[in-house]
Amino acid sequence: MNYLSVENLTKSYGARVLFKDLSFGINKGQKMALVAKNGTGKSSLLKIISGLDTADSGQVTLRKEVRVLYLGQDPQLPAGKTIEEAVFESDNPVLAAIREYEATITDPNKAEHMQAAMDNMERLKAWDFEAKVKQILGRLELKDLSLKVENLSGGQQKRVALAKVLMEEPDLLILDEPTNHLDLEMIEWLEEYLSRDNLSLLMVTHDRYFLERVCDEILEMEDGRLYRHKGNYSYFLEKKTERQENESVTTDKAKNLMKKELEWIRRQPKARGTKSKARVDAFEGIKEQASKKVDNKQVEMEIAMTRLGGKILELHRLRKSYGDKVILNGFDYSFRKGERLGIVGNNGTGKSTFLKLITGREELDGGKVITGETVKYGYYTQDGITLKDDKRVIEVIKDIAEYIPVGRKGSQISASQMLERFLFEGDAQYTFVSKLSGGERRRLYLLTVLMSNPNFLILDEPTNDLDILTLNVLEDFLMEFQGCLVIVTHDRYFMDKLTEHLFVFEGNGEVNDFIGSYSEYRAHKKAKEQAEKKAERQIEKAQTPKAEPKKVEKPKVKLSYKEKLEFEQLEKDIEKLEERKAEITNLFSQNNSDAEEIEKLSREMNEIVANLETKEMRWLELSEYEA
């Protein structure tokens, strides 16, 4: 069933054509993503489809009675309202019934209306929906619903707006960078939530794991044309590379290596989670290398690095608190040359504060930070820098330096040449900052950080608003960067590719150092949680007194002989699966396996977890009769 049709859509701003004669459609249950460079009109296209903007020509046709909801990058919430009022403000009768029922519980003056509210909930079958609403609010950490929305941070406001559109359950959901301002656990939950079969989706995102695991079709806008890829992110990489190979001859070495990677990808099973992310990452890098002669408009980042001495950064007994909230409690660490560190943790655990403390932007409560004399920080912050709207792009760079030293000794390039390497070409260099898209502003800010030739790079959420092309080249640059690198990011793909170990901020001043990638950390954590649940289950089983025989008034359904055998076998199977899961967890923690072995173990872990869930559900079902 077709939900949406876009026919010959064209949009321009003055002489700048964003897109021309775009046509595509979305069917019920389809999950489609739009991929393109920054500034090519992705957000504008979503707004036009949502009815928030108009096209120059063409038309958007929605099937009758199809409800569409749009969530932009910077949603606007109604001032003066609480989180609860903003979230439940809807013409959806089920949400209205839940709102009224919750009011009768919390407001003594409405207690007399309790029965009527409960009857209304029953009539609309809203009880299950209420549980779902509470799950969404809980997962997005929206606990105090009495807070006024104008007093929330930008990230909190984004989460409130996301909760609202998810609770509305529209027929078609349109999302523009939905993972921005979410912590990693929220992203993983949202990824699972959006993967449901009955949900139709159109989104713009730079999160490549999202594209890999959620989407079944990718639309690529390039050079004014639209390419449709019926598959996820790795399939998109295949087809894009094939197209580039047909357009031009590339270097033989990269071309041959790319063919091997394509053969490997084609041999892999198509189920979710079976492809090795490391190999997909490597393939992306090869694709970029092989296509350099095809696309001459890629970001180039050859920038000189200041020499780094023996002493780098030492942290001694760092302490920091805000009232009762402890960020660090006696933290020690000494950075080595070439350190590649990722920082993860839930929102509010102190990740950005940690960066400000080690760079002296915020005062410690106790302890000492010792910085080496040769250390030169390049600090990319979430907030960025304030760019004057009346400045032109080239003036922003010239205010820093007319000429910039690059990789080769004594070599330098002009501000204009540097801008060309960052995709600001020709007339684009004389564009006013006020006319730049969010991604273009980020790219310009990134340039101002890198052109200072740092040897210790600190990147706090560098991937926000950057397109995938820019991210690929930034990753290539950072892979070759010889200095120290510290990254805070919600982009799991970016984190996996560039970091070697993690600082995990657990809250209450606890920071753990995990050796390995983020994906390895998540597998380790999940296996540990499963092992703890097994131990709890065994303790509960041991502590539960055996029931005394008693007369049963009603006939009891007993297990058949075959079911008894199945029940006994299930207990044995569950125990073996738990033991094997613990073994794999131990292997992950040792971190001494090669890439192929890690891939094999990860696949086996996924199978074990799925198998355990099935067997435990059946065990519980049979145990009710057995008891």
Image (cartoon, rainbow, N blue to C red):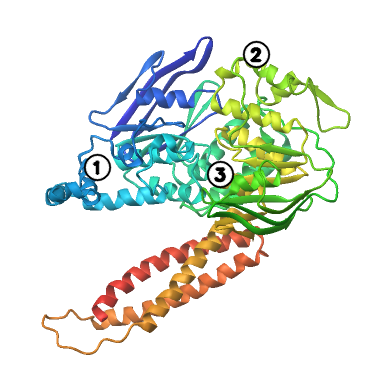
Decide: marks 2, 1 in contact (CB < 8 A)? no
- The quadrant of the image that shows the C terminus is bottom left
- The quadrant of the image that shows the N terminus is top left
Quick one: SS at disc 1? helix
The crowding category of the residue bearing disc 3, from other C-alpha atoms within 10 Å (few below 14, some 14 to 19, many at least 20), is many
Q: Which amino acid does label 3 sit on?
A: Asp
Q: Earlier in the sequence, mark 2 or mark 1?
A: 1
Q: Which amino acid does label 1 sit on?
A: Leu
Q: Name the residue under label 3.
A: 491
Residue situated in front as seen by the camera: 322 or 424: 322
Q: Name the residue under label 1.
A: 95
x, y percent for residue 133: 31, 48
Check the image and report above or below for 349 versus 65.
below
The crowding category of the residue bearing disc 2, from other C-alpha atoms within 10 Å (few below 14, some 14 to 19, many at least 20), is some
Q: Name the residue under label 2.
A: 430
Disc 2 from disc 1: Cα separation = 50 Å
